[in-house]
Amino acid sequence: VPTQPPATLTPAPTPTDTPLPVDAPSTNMTATAAAALTPTSTPLPVASSGELVIEITEVLGVGQVDQEMVVIKNLGDTPAGMQDWTLSGPDGNVFTFPYVRLWGEGAVTVHTGIGVNGSPAEHYYCGRLQPLWSLGDVVTLKDAQGMVLATYTVGQ
């Protein structure tokens, strides 16, 4: 009868938590993929205005509801939670942001017309049937506490 060598026991590995790196979603990422990387249960705190460099960089398609849009950029490195921020003009029209994360050096676009917020990613819609902006209008971006973060004069 052949004999077998004694069995060698190998201890089972101990599981450990290994955090995965998560980079800011690219502008080419789908809204679904970006949502998977962005936790929705814990809003990102808004940094003080001294830490943020937020700018309304342009208003395009003025007077044409299907082309009218406002581009907002974060020129700094600090991401911002934009929930309850407002974009407004002189006629009392106000767009209030849902939960949005504006990444450092990222941008969001607010369209006057109808569409689905977040489709494509970083695009939001006022749902209006008429244009909102005219030459000379002042567009104002305020944080959730009402502090003015940026203004832009249309056509200048």
Image (spheres, rainbow, N blue to C red):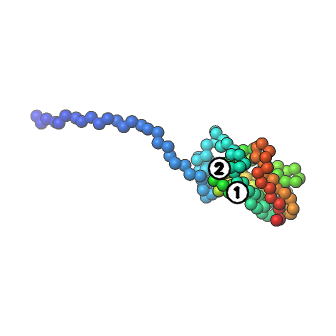
| Furthest residue in direction front, as rendered | 50
What element does badge 1 sit on?
A: strand
Q: Residues within 10 Å of mark 2 (few under 14, many from 20)?
A: many
Foreground residue, 82 or 131? 82
Q: Please give the label number shown on residue 11.
A: none
Query: How busy is the neighbourhood of tag 1: few (under 14 within 10 Å), some, or many (20 plus)?
Result: some
Residue 18 placement (x, y as % from top left): 47, 42
Q: Is residue 94 left or right of residue 53?
A: right
Number of marks present in the image shown: 2
Q: Is residue 60 above or below residue 79?
A: below
Q: Earlier in the sequence, mark 2 or mark 1?
A: 1
The C terminus, quarter of image: bottom right
Compared across the picture, whether 118 is left or right of 114 comes to: left
Task: Name the residue at 68% across, 49% down.
Answer: 51
Which amino acid lies under the numbered mark 1 shown in the image of this protein?
Lys
Give the amino acid at mark 2.
Pro
Label 2: state its secondary structure: loop
Quadrant location, the N terminus = top left
Measuring 65% from the left and 43% from the top, which residue is drawn there?
44
* Residue at the right extreme, as displayed: 91
Residue 112 horizontal/vertical position (percent): 79, 56
Residue under pointer 1: 73
The residue tagged 2 is: 79
Q: Is residue 106 visible?
A: no
Left or right relative to 127: residue 26: left
**Residue 4 horizontal/vertical position (percent):** 16, 36
* Residue lying at the far bottom of the rendered structure: 156
Real-space CA distance between mark 2 and mark 1, rounded to the nearest whole angstrom = 11 Å
